[in-house]
Image (cartoon, rainbow, N blue to C red):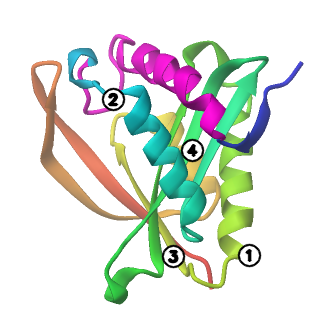
Amino acid sequence: MSPVIRPAQPDDARALLAYMKAIFSEPDLSLPVEPDEFSVSLADENEVLAKAAANPRELFLVAVDGAKVVGVLNVVANQRRANQHDVSFGLTVARDYRGQGLGTRLLEQMLAWARSNDLITSVNLTVWKRNRAAIRLYRRFGFRPCGERKYAVHRYGRFQTVVAMELLLQ
């Protein structure tokens, strides 16, 4: 059965923490977090979920297979008036579920939500340049590169170039 995608609920906090610990422990992962740096408590995760649920410009989606979280897409709103129309997101999919369209489904659901939200006019993200599969996915949805940071991340013994991408919804 295909994973179900839905907004995260407070009851998901424990499963989300387990998922994130597993994601950050993957070898050669394209995220700037070392496994020992992830120290979010259950109370902290509950607060993140409550904040996202209370803000009309934020969204926290989970893909679940039974009780197990296997994908996450988290939209975070900018707080300043000058850029509150713009939101950023992060997307991860568990290793065993990659290449099966789950990232596509998460992105489709998020963009449908963003396009129906009058408060949001643009969406942005950053992705490691070496993550070609993710960049292809984002390009398919109309995201375009808008800059690079060659020294933004130092992981695996060298600098990793980060690509900024954006999509104007209107």
Q: Which of labels 1 and 3 is toward the front?
A: 1
Which mark sits nearer the N-terminus, 3 or 4? 4
Q: Callout 2, which amino acid? A: Val
Is residue 147 part of the magenta span, yes or no?
no
Q: Callout 1, which amino acid? A: Ser
Q: Are marks 3 and 4 in contact (CB under 8 Å)?
A: no
Coordinates of residue 153 in the picture (x, y in percent): 16, 38
Identify residue for label 3: 122
Which mark sits nearer the N-terminus, 2 or 1? 2
- The tag on residue 40 is 2
- The tag on residue 116 is 1
| Cα distance between the residues tagged 2 and 1 | 32 Å
Please, what secondary structure does the residue beneath circle 3 have? strand
Region in magenta: 9-34
| Cα distance between the residues tagged 3 and 4 | 16 Å
Q: Is residue 4 left or right of residue 60?
A: right
| Cα distance between the residues tagged 4 and 2 | 17 Å
For the question of whether residue 124 can be seen, the reply is yes
| Cα distance between the residues tagged 1 and 3 | 12 Å
Coordinates of residue 93 in the picture (x, y in percent): 57, 28
Please, what secondary structure does the residue beneath circle 1 have? loop
Could you tell me which residue is drawn at 32 percent across and 52 percent down?
163
Q: Is residue 132 left or right of residue 32?
A: right
Identify residue for label 4: 73
Coordinates of residue 67 in the picture (x, y in percent): 73, 18
Q: Are marks 4 and 2 in contact (CB under 8 Å)?
A: no
